[in-house]
Image (cartoon, rainbow, N blue to C red):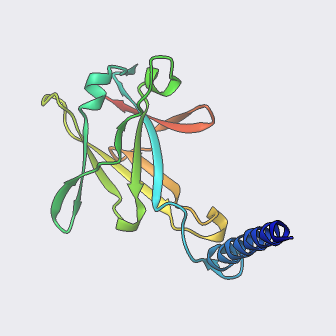
């Protein structure tokens, strides 16, 4: 009889935990009428490839040495959520030199600067605009516009992910 009470209590605790989790999701989630109370991630992801004179750059040591800077309160900072997607040679993203940038949307920074290890290459400007969380964006920051040196870059798709093609003259 005591083991039956233990199983019954265990079951009640499980149901209670489910009710708490479901209630939390209802209160904090995204509702069409109430708007968003939270965003799952405060980042807008941008994937891109770098081209020079129309040729795709896949040299991982070169791509890994590119830095991305931005200014906040007149002070220069370097983005830490930026770089070559890590993987093996069989990884389609890695083999194709696809880089990623997670824009911290809550900082409201739109202009970034690609700094190359080869000083003969001029710094490039990357403008990234995103939509704030709303029921229409599933409570996520969604990429709205991107410009590379003032121009909208072409894009392609790799495994259902939009990848922007930045062509450095």
Q: Is residue 22 above or below residue 152?
A: below
Q: Position of residue 19 (x, y in %)?
A: 74, 75
**Direction bottom: furthest residue:** 34
The quadrant of the image that shows the N terminus is bottom right
To which quarter of the image does residue 51 belong? top left
The quadrant of the image that shows the C terminus is top left
Image-based side of 121 in relation to 83, left or right: left
| Frontmost residue, 19 versus 167 | 19
Q: Position of residue 46 (x, y in %)?
A: 46, 45
Q: How many marks?
A: 0
Q: Position of residue 28 (x, y in %)?
A: 61, 76
To which quarter of the image does residue 138 belong? bottom right
Image-based side of 92 in relation to 35, left or right: left
Image point (66%, 82%), residue name? 34
Image point (70%, 78%), residue name? 23
Image point (28%, 50%), residue name? 79
**Direction front: furthest residue:** 1
**Direction left: furthest residue:** 119
Q: Is residue 90 above or below residue 107?
A: above
| Frontmost residue, 113 versus 151 | 113
Q: Position of residue 103 (x, y in %)?
A: 40, 54
Image-based side of 155 in relation to 10, left or right: left
Image point (45%, 17%), residue name? 89
To which quarter of the image does residue 68 belong? top left
| Frontmost residue, 134 versus 42 | 42
């Amino acid at each position: 009889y005591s083991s039956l009470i233990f199983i019954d209590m265990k079951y009640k605790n499980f149901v209670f935990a489910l009710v708490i989790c479901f209630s939390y999701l209802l209160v904090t989630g995204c509702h069409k009428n109430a708007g968003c109370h939270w965003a799952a991630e405060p980042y807008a992801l941008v994937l891109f490839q770098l081209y020079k004179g129309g040729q795709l750059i896949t040299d991982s040591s070169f791509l890994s040495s590119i830095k991305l800077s931005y200014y906040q309160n007149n002070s220069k900072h370097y983005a830490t959520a930026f770089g070559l997607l890590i993987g093996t040679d069989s990884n389609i993203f890695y083999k194709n030199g696809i880089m990623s940038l997670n824009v911290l949307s809550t900082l409201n920074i739109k202009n970034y600067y690609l700094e190359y290890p080869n000083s003969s290459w001029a710094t490039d400007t990357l403008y990234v605009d995103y939509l704030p969380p709303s029921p229409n964006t599933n409570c996520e920051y969604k990429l709205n516009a991107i410009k590379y040196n003032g121009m909208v870059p072409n894009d392609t798709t790799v495994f259902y992910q939009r990848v922007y093609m930045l062509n450095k003259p």
